[in-house]
Amino acid sequence: MNNWRIVFEKTGRAVYISHLDLMRTFQRVFQRAAVSIKHTEGFNPHAYISIALPLSLGCESVCELLDFDAPETEDVSGLPEKLNEVLPEGIRVLTIMPRGRKAKFIKWTKWEIELVYDTPGKREELIRRLFERESLMIERKTKKGTSDVELIGNIKEITVCGEGQNVLVTAVISAQEPSIRPDYLVEAICREIPEAAPDFRRFKRIEIFDENMEIFR
């Protein structure tokens, strides 16, 4: 078996495909594209694939990573084109490469958070000052319950730019141990400066890094 990793994007209407449905989609897509990959054993075998850092529903990404194993005889040189022919709208394979490090070595993710307002106003400076604080706690919900986590200490970089009635927050946040979701930043804005609470928000993951801020692939 050869170990492979594909980079794909999930945008547009595809953001409303859940992680489990995305896994099922790729399982079917490999089959429709007549690409041989490793399957689980048992009565009902299915394609063995894994996706690093599953996205929350409604989030876009241009840097998703999917790993799979293929027989040594399988030619993957034209795989992106084969898969893109049968993938649904909004999901597109960008490239394929030999699998490198395991996903546990991912440390940081870079996000664009677009805050949309129904009315104009000067909000970017309020938001900028919020994330200049020395400490900002947020409640994080997990399967084991709730816990408080320090937000500021897990933001590596952040910029806030205003444009018309929108504010664009670009942030590099901890991906694992602890896992900081981009909506935590919006929750902090709504709680601490309710006058800057957005009427709508969009999230897009634009890059993944290791602990040294090198792009993870």
Image (cartoon, helix red, strand yellow):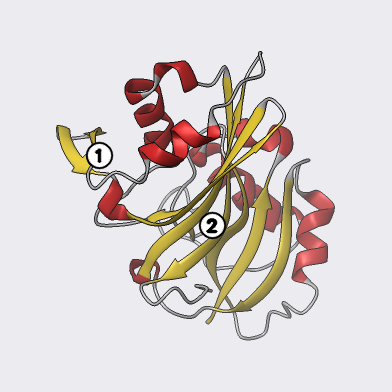
The image quarter containing residue 139 is top left
Residue toward you, 191 or 3: 191
Name which residue type carries label 1. Leu
Q: Give the number of the disc on residue 151.
A: none
Relative to 113, residue 86 above or below: below
Element assignment for label 1: loop
Q: Give the number of the disc on residue 47.
A: 2
In the displayed structure, does residue 105 sit left or right of residue 3? left
Foreground label between 1 and 2: 1
Residue toward you, 54 or 199: 199
Residue 24 position, x and y percent, is: 57, 43
In the displayed structure, does residue 151 sit left or right of residue 80? left
The image quarter containing residue 172 is bottom left
Q: Give the number of the disc on residue 136.
A: 1
Residue toward you, 125 or 166: 125
Q: CA distance from mark 1 to mark 2?
A: 43 Å
In the displayed structure, does residue 102 sit left or right of residue 214? left
